[in-house]
Image (cartoon, rainbow, N blue to C red):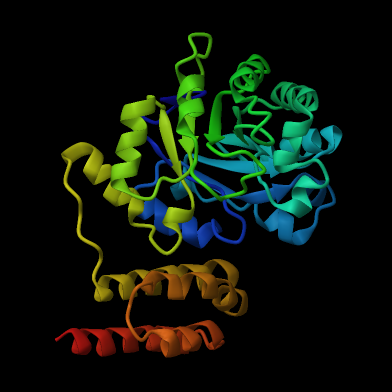
């Protein structure tokens, strides 16, 4: 599979862009576990054109992340074009247009999945951005607005005609949000449309190695995007790759391995964002590394309330001492 001239090989795995999750420290961890393609968090075109500091900070990329894309969202065509030019100047491998985010505050402005209600504007905006920048432009979207308007097969052809280099499809409508099951049959229909020649990346309900393999085998997609299953479990990329090549399921990481990983992630967060912000923004990750451990409530509370960057690794070490002794 290729995005423009970027050769991703066979069975590439994509880390889905997720707001407040796929920051630089989480991308670093996922890359170490084998994620082939990374994305920034959602970048607001309005915020970028206004030079809002928090938005501009999201454009920070690192060489070890490549290939990496900057994902933009917005509802105003001129702002999206300007934002794409600003993003291109940072040097991403590609720019991704978010036409799939179902969050109400984004959709109500006509951005994200709201664009599915104005497909002509979506196509016009996409074509204008493709013409405005030199790097590849990709799109992520959904099946349609609701059950009565699953327009993805026709929409995919139109987006291809607008010049995009690849298309990611989440197998739900906007109305579904993240409820119910993802419908991969329509993703497969797009992929197997003889008029389509750009890569198709499938997304939705990929929870581990077996569902990833089934998606590749049944629907013939060029790549798979993993989102929520990576949160608290970034080793999912390693596990999927191992299973795709060997048919063998790897064991779950031990408590010691999870603690070591959490400490590495925490150190990267502090290094990238500084002690105060690094500690605060790691809270959403730390306890998730230990989902399923019995009697973890007290330790979880300690992890998500501790402000001292020197104290957090000590708390993590306590998890090893407690649970390894408990298991023994």
Q: Does the rendering let one see residue 114?
A: yes
Along the horizontal axis of the image, is 167 left or right of 105? left
Nearer to me, 268 or 166: 166
75 is higher (above) or lower (below) than 153: below
Number of numbered labels in the structure image: 0
Image location of residue 265, percent across then percent down = 43, 68
Quadrant location of the N terminus? top left
Nearer to me, 64 or 264: 264
Give the farthest residue toward the front.
148
Q: Quadrant of residue 159?
A: top right
163 is higher (above) or lower (below) than 281: above
For the point 81% across and 47% down, the residue is 108
Q: Does the rendering let one see residue 90?
A: no
326 is higher (above) or lower (below) than 192: below
Image location of residue 323, percent across then percent down = 26, 85
For the point 45% across and 16% down, the residue is 192
Quadrant location of the C terminus? bottom left
187 is higher (above) or lower (below) than 161: below
Image location of residue 264, percent across then percent down = 39, 70
Image location of residue 227, percent across then percent down = 48, 50
Nearer to me, 182 or 204: 182
Give the farthest residue toward the top.
194
Give the farthest residue toward the left.
328
For the point 78% across and 22% down, the residue is 120
For the point 65% across and 54% down, the residue is 58
């Amino acid at each position: 599979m290729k995005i423009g001239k970027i050769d991703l090989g066979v069975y590439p795995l994509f880390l889905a862009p997720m707001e407040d999750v796929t920051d630089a420290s989480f991308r670093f961890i996922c890359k170490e576990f084998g994620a082939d393609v990374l994305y920034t968090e959602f970048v607001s075109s309005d915020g970028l054109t206004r030079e809002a500091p928090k938005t501009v900070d999201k454009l920070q990329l690192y060489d070890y992340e490549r290939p990496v894309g900057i994902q933009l969202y917005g509802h105003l065509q001129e702002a999206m074009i300007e934002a794409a030019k600003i993003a291109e100047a940072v040097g991403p491998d590609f720019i991704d247009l978010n036409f799939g985010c179902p969050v109400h505050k984004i959709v109500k402005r006509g951005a994200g999945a709201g664009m599915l209600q104005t497909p002509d504007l979506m196509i016009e905006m996409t074509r204008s951005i493709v013409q405005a920048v030199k790097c590849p432009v990709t799109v992520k979207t959904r099946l349609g607005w609701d059950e009565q308007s699953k327009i993805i097969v026709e929409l995919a052809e139109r987006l291809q005609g607008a010049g995009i280099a690849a298309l990611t499809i989440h197998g739900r409508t906007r109305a579904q949000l993240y409820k119910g099951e993802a419908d991969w049959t329509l993703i497969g229909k797009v992929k197997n449309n003889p008029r389509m020649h750009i890569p198709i990346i499938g997304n939705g309900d990929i929870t581990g190695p077996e569902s990833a393999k089934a998606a590749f085998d049944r629907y013939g997609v060029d790549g798979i995007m993993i989102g929520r299953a990576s949160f608290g479990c970034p080793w999912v990329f390693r596990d999927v790759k191992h299973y795709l090549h060997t048919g063998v399921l790897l064991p779950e990481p031990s408590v010691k391995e999870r603690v070591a990983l959490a400490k590495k992630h925490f150190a990267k967060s502090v290094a990238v964002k500084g002690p105060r912000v690094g500690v605060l923004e790691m809270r959403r990750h730390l306890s998730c590394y230990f989902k399923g451990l019995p009697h973890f409530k007290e330790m979880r509370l300690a992890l998500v309330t501790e402000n001292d960057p020197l104290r957090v690794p000590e708390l993590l070490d306590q998890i090893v001492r407690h649970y390894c002794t408990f298991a023994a």
